[in-house]
Image (cartoon, coloured by chain):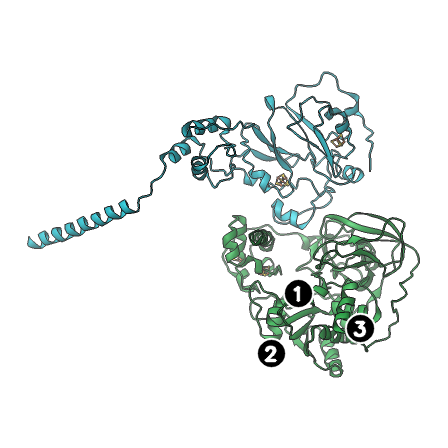
Amino acid sequence: MLKSFRIGGIHPKENKLSAGMAIQPIAVPEQVVIPLLQHIGAPCQPVVKKGDKVKVGSLIGKSVGFVSAQIHSSVSGTVLKIDKAMDASGYKRDAVFIKVEEDVWEEQIDRSDELVTACSLTPKEILDKIAAAGIVGMGGATFPTHVKLTPPPGMKAELLIINGVECEPYLTSDHQLMMEKSDEILVGITLVMRVLNVQRAIIGIENNKKDAVALFTRKVAAYPGIEVQPLKVQYPQGGEKQLIDALTGRQVPSGALPISVGAVVQNVGTVFAIYEAVQKNKPLVERVVTVTGKEVQRPCNLRARIGTPLTKLIDAAGGLPESTGKVISGGPMMGKALASIDIPVTKGTSGILIVPAPEAKRREMKDCIRCGKCVQVCPMGLNPTLLMTLTEYEVWDRAEKNAITDCIECGSCSYTCPAYRPLLDYIRLGKSKVNGIIRARKN
Amino acid sequence: MSVILTAVATLGAIGAGSAGILYLVSQKFKVVEDPRIQEVQDALPAANCGGCGFPGCAAFAAACVSADSLEELSCPVGGQETMDRVAAILGQTASKTTKKIAVVRCSGSCEERPRQNLYDGASKCSIAAALYGGDTGCSFGCLGLGDCVDSCTFDAIHINPVTMLPEVVEDTCTACGACVKACPKDIIELRKQGPKSRRIYVSCVNKDKGGVARKACNVACIGCSKCQQVCPFDAITMENNLAYIIDDKCRLCRKCAPVCPTNSILELNFPPRKETPPAAKEKEVPITA
Ligand code: SF4
Ligand code: SF4
Ligand code: SF4
Ligand code: SF4
């Protein structure tokens, strides 16, 4: 039997329409808009001003504070302005507008496709390069990678887990990246193992990507310490805590970080970015984005520069279908419906999902019938229906006792509920309130 | 017969014994409550709305009795009258309070502020606000899902079905501040009710640059500072492209409202103006970016 996490989980239709589509680079647009906040943490300070000339890879946003990630120009050209622009959050935030002129890259960046395996840097130097390249968790969480690779004092990682699960339906960007850049990813893994000083790494891949499992099983032989583990197709297999449970049987305690059980999890996309940053001196200026949807003409995997308008990507996939009801940034489970498609690709844009109108509509909420299905599927062992009620009535102390802050916002409960209750919407609200209360208590 | 007698005697004895114990215990652990707490509580409106900052009227009464002075304490529902009565019971003087009222600082009705997308998530402002800026081009304005309405104990705020904006009922609003806390967009403010309920305020919270704000909403403050220039009492501040009228300084002279090119400044309960100043009628709206 294939390994999996032990409680809850669902199996939504996979709908991997763009599977097997080779990653196509998309043309550099005439203008890019690069938000100064593309990660979890403090927004960057712009270091360019109107009229400045930049090249691909030039630093344009400097991180302030530890939990933050540098931002680089993804094109060469002239800075038009620094102004507010809407991003996937649905709010207007500071961004750098750059008019594209030619395609000149910073000299130190190695643009060849050649695989560079040798690396003579010390772990500290590798970590600094990762920080300088502005790498964040590419699975969508966008947590700054150099912070995640710096265990808190007194803690030591003993195992690196590579997340090649891609459990979100529809998305195929990680899968395709694994198929096309397997060696780069494996070199990236050895680099991260050096940083963390661990001897063992496991790549977890959901078993619906049999080709990727086979490919990596063949290739890891040349890389000591790296293993591959196929996993049962079950959502949310790619959740950090679920993945650790599935691969090691260890359970991360409530409220603790994965490092507390000695594990650090990195997404394959992130590892690839680490490879490029360390071996090729290339900062994070582009990423793979899946553009997909049932009515989309050509579902595809595109490599786009950060700051490219989403509309360009949608056009490359055959344009926005007539029937569109919703456009989602990310996958259908954890992605976010967009208020406008006039927004740029950012470091966390793993996919663009175009949902036809009939499917996009939420159904009318009914009363809870106490079927307990939400409790059954919650991978964190929570009681979603109770948490929703507690949030509705603002009973924060009980919500806290019932571990509302453990919710990973996977959406399994809302997906399952036969009464169409917006469980996660409420729980997310309650979670942020309770987190606020906890923070206030600490200060 | 003797069975009955024994039963009565034993039960009687147990009863008397228990009564004795209960009496002693109640004497020993007697809680002496200041009788004035009850008196003060009786003088309060028993709305239990929390507007005073205490969990209910009883807690507020206790706080009044134990406080050295009534300066910081006030019951927004009962107002001056109630606080004077409380002060009389406690032999103190109540501080003078000004009657306030909740004011919704957004005029972006469906007509003035076109909808650009459709929200169909859970019908709660705080949930929508966590997801995005709202269904119009203005990410500061009212979402119209009625968290404020749900929070009001006095049924004093309602969503107008035509404008989709909340409206405050003048006579019922007690200024308890529940809606102010409930609104995730910080749109509602407690302002001085003003003589004859007359008040002037900037009915907009948009901090975008003028051009952006104007594009999203016809009645947005565009930060042109015309009102600030015309105000003789220095009552208007400009911050982040947004005008704000300080009610303590405003003397209700009505000079600012007509100069506002976007009609963002509302005057309530004033008699109609004799002649309409031309500025307010101008169709061409100058936009400062
Ligand atoms: S969204 Fe939260 S409560 Fe709902 S199933 Fe996922 S972890 Fe559980
Ligand atoms: S799944 Fe829905 S109906 Fe069933 S118990 Fe949970 S909230 Fe209630
Ligand atoms: S004023 Fe605030 S709470 Fe009331 S409907 Fe508008 S956004 Fe919601
Ligand atoms: S005149 Fe109107 S638009 Fe201009 S600053 Fe004052 S309130 Fe804003």
Q: Which residue extends farthest left?
A: B1
Q: Earlier in the sequence, mark 2 or mark 1?
A: 2
Chain painted cyan: B
Residue A332 seen in this snapshot: yes
Q: Are marks 2 and 1 in contact (CB under 8 Å)?
A: no
Q: Quadrant of residue B115?
A: top right
Q: What element does badge 2 sit on?
A: loop
Chain painted green: A
Q: Which residue extends farthest top?
A: B274
Q: What element does badge 3 sit on?
A: helix
Judge if badges 2 and 3 mark residues of a common chain. yes
Chain to which the residue tagged by mark 1 belongs: A
Residue B27 drawn at (x, y percent):
27, 45
**Label 3 crowd bin: few (<14), some (14–19), many (20+), radius 10 Å:** some
Residue B160 seen in this snapshot: no
**What mark, if any, has residue A1 been given in the picture?**
2
Residue A321 drawn at (x, y percent):
78, 54
- Residue A419 shown left or right of residue B264 in the figure: left
Residue type at numbered disc 3: Glu
Relative to A100, say whether B232 is above or below. above
Residue A438 drawn at (x, y percent):
56, 54
The residue singled out by tag 1 in the image is A13
